Amino acid sequence: MVQTNEMTFEEYKKTWLENLGINSENKLENGRKFVCELFEKWKQIDEDDTDLTVLDGSGDGGIDVSFLERGNKFGETLSEEQEGDRYYLVQGKLGENDNNYVTIISEFTKLLGNLEQDNPRLSETAKREFQRVQNFILRASPDRGDKLIWVFASLDSPNNASMKAVEHVRTLGNKKFKDLFDVEVISLRTLFSGQEEAKNESIKITLNGNLVLSSDDVLIGSVKLTEFYDFLKSYREKSGNLDQIFEKNVRMFLGSGKKVNKQIRETLIKEPKLFGLYNNGITIVSYDFEYNKGANSIELTDPHIVNGCQTTKTIHDVFRQKYDTGGHGDSNDEWLKKIKEGNLLVKIVKTGQKQKGILSDITRYTNSQNAISVKDFTALDDNVQSWKGDFEKKYGIFLEIQRGAWEAQKTLVRTRTIQKKYDDYENVFDLIKVYAAGMLELPGLAYEKNDPFAPGGYVFEKITSALGNPVELITPDKLYAAHLLKTAANDVGFGRRSQQLSRKQSRFLFYYSVIGILKRTFKFINIKQDSDMITKVLINLKQNFPDAFNELISRGTNLIDEYLTQPDTTEDEYTDETASAAF
């Protein structure tokens, strides 16, 4: 039998649960661990982020995990648009009832009740969190992109009954919180489907519209807004998750509140007939399409939207709230009459076997205005792909450049004999931020933001561009030095799970401090202080002088503990300027 590298979801699931330590003894603890791990992986939450709260036990109030994702201010994102705050309330189940209609509705109803009035039976952690959510609801502004998002998390893809329950939850939430509320559905399949190694069943969706062939592989034209909504609705019903349509290899996982484009919504509501004139349209890539010119229809195989994601999400949300509301009576609603005349510009590209390369190029060059998780862009960069091979070959550590690739790698190792086994891994985006915090002296920026460190960000360009300073360019050796620092930080307990307050949010300051100690030592003995020399010394100390390396780490740790425990110092003052004051 010929062995392939394609893994099944069952293989992936078994390995993932084993690595998580799921057993049959404590179902409540298993469920909590599962939901927390799944959500953290989905949102790519940093170890230093303290806005994640885990609620467990009978007093959780209908929430397993909550997370406040703080939006960037104007000008801080790749799209240069306002990004609102998003408050995620996560409810999940692990086991035979994880897709139970009654369970989903009852848990959400319980959550609503606890938001409306105080419940003395809640745990102390839950009481504090519900109070925080209530304050968020009072202060939130949907027009500025704020969203309250209920997340349903399950092991397998939701079945039809659970999807009906989710839609019921959406209806209840929209009735209660209007435009502030939205729903997301995630499962372990969500992570699995993001892997290049995964082979999913093809999805075929029909799109009706007035399009013409520009070339053998390209269709261009206009589609009625109502027809486009029907297309999205059909995709959601067949896939179980609308967000899967947002690009195949680089998962966007967009929440509808992310970088909300107020102008798109206003045009849809006030002047839908003019929508096609004001909007730049969308780009769909499809593995294949069958064009029926006479019927003005196109059957798309595995369609993915790579440009116009915000437009798509806004159309979907507005239509769900104002158009797809049910009822069979006649309506004199002027908006319903106008919306039927609205159009959307659409370009469809057939990719076929060339899909991966075309997707990479289209995604990179057409998404400057879209709401994308910037960490996902690293998988497309040629520099990153080059680092991966060199780093793994030299140091024997798996370099994860795409979300969830480490879990996929472990699954393939367990089920395929042809895969190389790695005992350790690192995420390339994490190492880039470690390098920048220490070598480039940017701990505050690394703590606060992600965008500058992703392709297109100014720090990333600085460490990869030929126009930059040669000694600042990242190499596999520098990634390994960053790995040594990150591992040391883990060993001494930096991160939000730390029992010491001074180490909960000071990981990047620790990297800066350790490198700062080396730089000052180099200056004292008249040695150049660039990143090339620092990298060589760090690696040499770890490999040949472990006691000296441990002493360096100890001094860096003590420096942080002493500085952050001074009476007049708080972690809120953590910036690049105050980092320098630590010395």
Image (cartoon, rainbow, N blue to C red):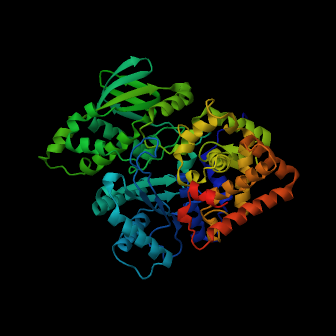
Q: Position of residue 291 (x, y in %)?
A: 38, 23
Q: Residue at x 46, y 74 (%)?
A: 128
Which quadrant of the rendered structure holds the N terminus? top right
Q: Position of residue 510 (x, y in %)?
A: 67, 58
Looking at the picture, does residue 231 appear above or below residue 50? above
User: In the displayed image of the protein, which residue is found farthest to the top?
Assistant: 215
Q: Is 282 or 394 nearer to us in this picture?
A: 394
Q: Quadrant of residue 194?
A: top right
Asked whether the viewer can see residue 421, the reply is no
Q: Quadrant of residue 216?
A: top left
Q: Is 506 or 575 nearer to us in this picture?
A: 575
Q: Position of residue 58 (x, y in %)?
A: 50, 76
Q: Residue at x 65, y 60 (%)?
A: 20
Please indicate whether residue 98 sits to the left or right of residue 233 in the image. Answer: right
Please indicate whether residue 251 sits to the left or right of residue 117 in the image. Answer: right
Which quadrant of the rendered structure holds the C terminus? bottom right
Q: Position of residue 2 (x, y in %)?
A: 72, 33
Looking at the picture, does residue 491 appear above or below residue 84? below
User: In the displayed image of the protein, which residue is found farthest to the left?
Assistant: 332
- Tell how many labels: 0
User: In the displayed image of the protein, which residue is found farthest to the bottom?
Assistant: 120
Please indicate whether residue 574 sits to the left or right of residue 103 in the image. Answer: right
Q: Quadrant of residue 108?
A: bottom left
Q: Residue at x 48, y 47 (%)?
A: 253
Looking at the picture, does residue 13 appear above or below residue 61? above
Asked whether the viewer can see residue 195, the reply is yes
